[in-house]
Image (cartoon, rainbow, N blue to C red):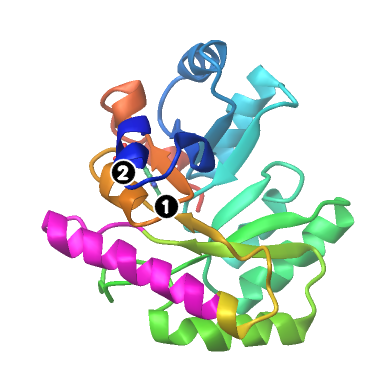
Amino acid sequence: MQEAARQSGRTANEIRLIAISKYMPTDYVLAAMSAGQHCFGENTVQEALSKQDLIDNPDNEWHFVGHLQSNKAKMIAGNFDWLHTLDSLRLASRLSENAINAAQTLDVLLQVNIADDPDKFGLPASAVPRFIDDILDAGLAGIRLRGLMTIGQRDATPDERRADFSALRELRDACMARFELPRFSELSMGMSGDFEAAISEGATMIRVGSALFGPRPAPNPASSDN
Ligand SMILES: *Cc1c(COP(=O)(O)O)cnc(C)c1O
């Protein structure tokens, strides 16, 4: 991270490292915590809650990075600080309602399908301004729009990936110029295989799993609750 940041004239402390601990045992999370890591990401509610039960450290910051159906929205407030995968108005309004009930303001990122990959969730880039308009019109006090998130295409070349990251940054800049959203500054992009490129294109959050924890075991199908 330091090297990638330095090469693009940035510093690593402006980039949040989110350790993606999905499918890894709780011991791995505890080991990362002893090494000073406090930001963790999970992609199913159930797995995150079972780890949080064993850990219970108020200094930890939990990020939800999985796809979420709106009927699971009630599990987010009170259990996560950030959600990276907002992609529908219905989900936004449920998240907000539940966050208000939990006396929380949830930080959210809009997931963008920046390369229009038919296999990926997320809003097409062209739909993002209208989506933000709709959210602002709905006056959802329980959520705070903080920026954009994308997942790199699996088979993209390094150049294509970089172009996607750059397009996400430009989209964020356009949104910041168009809307009164001073805190809409975050860019969650880059994983184990491409975080350096993401950092050079302006990532403020990288989501790294296997490069930190080693290869993941296969997911347990019974635990995929969202
Ligand atoms: C699993 C996952 C990651 C981490 O992937 P690695 O390649 O292991 O770093 C990042 N983001 C999301 C949304 C994920 O589901």
* Residue positioned 38% across, 68% down in the render: 168
As rendered, which of 146 and 213 lies closer to the eye? 146
Work out whether residue 183 can be spotted. yes
Left or right of 101 in this view: 218: left
Secondary-structure class at tag 2: helix
The first of marks 1 and 2 along the sequence is 2
Query: In the image, residue 118 lies at what x, y percent?
Result: 26, 74
Secondary-structure class at tag 1: loop
- Ligand 1 near label 2 (Cβ, under 8 Å)? yes
In the depicted structure, whether residue 99 falls above or below residue 39 = below
Residue receiving disc 2: 195
Q: Are marks 1 and 2 in contact (CB under 8 Å)?
A: yes
Work out whether residue 155 can be spotted. no
In the depicted structure, whether residue 63 falls above or below residue 73 = above
Left or right of 70 in this view: 117: left
Residue 203's label in the rendered image is: 1
Residue type at mark 2? Phe
Please state the extent of the stretch shown in magenta in the rendering: 151-175
Which quarter of the rendering shows the N terminus?
top left
Query: In the image, residue 8 lies at what x, y percent?
Result: 32, 47
Is 172 part of what is drawn in magenta? Answer: yes
* Residue positioned 55% across, 10% down in the render: 34
Q: Which quadrant holds residue 186?
A: bottom right
Q: Which quadrant holds residue 157?
A: bottom left
Ligand 1: which quarter? top left
- Ligand 1 near label 1 (Cβ, under 8 Å)? no
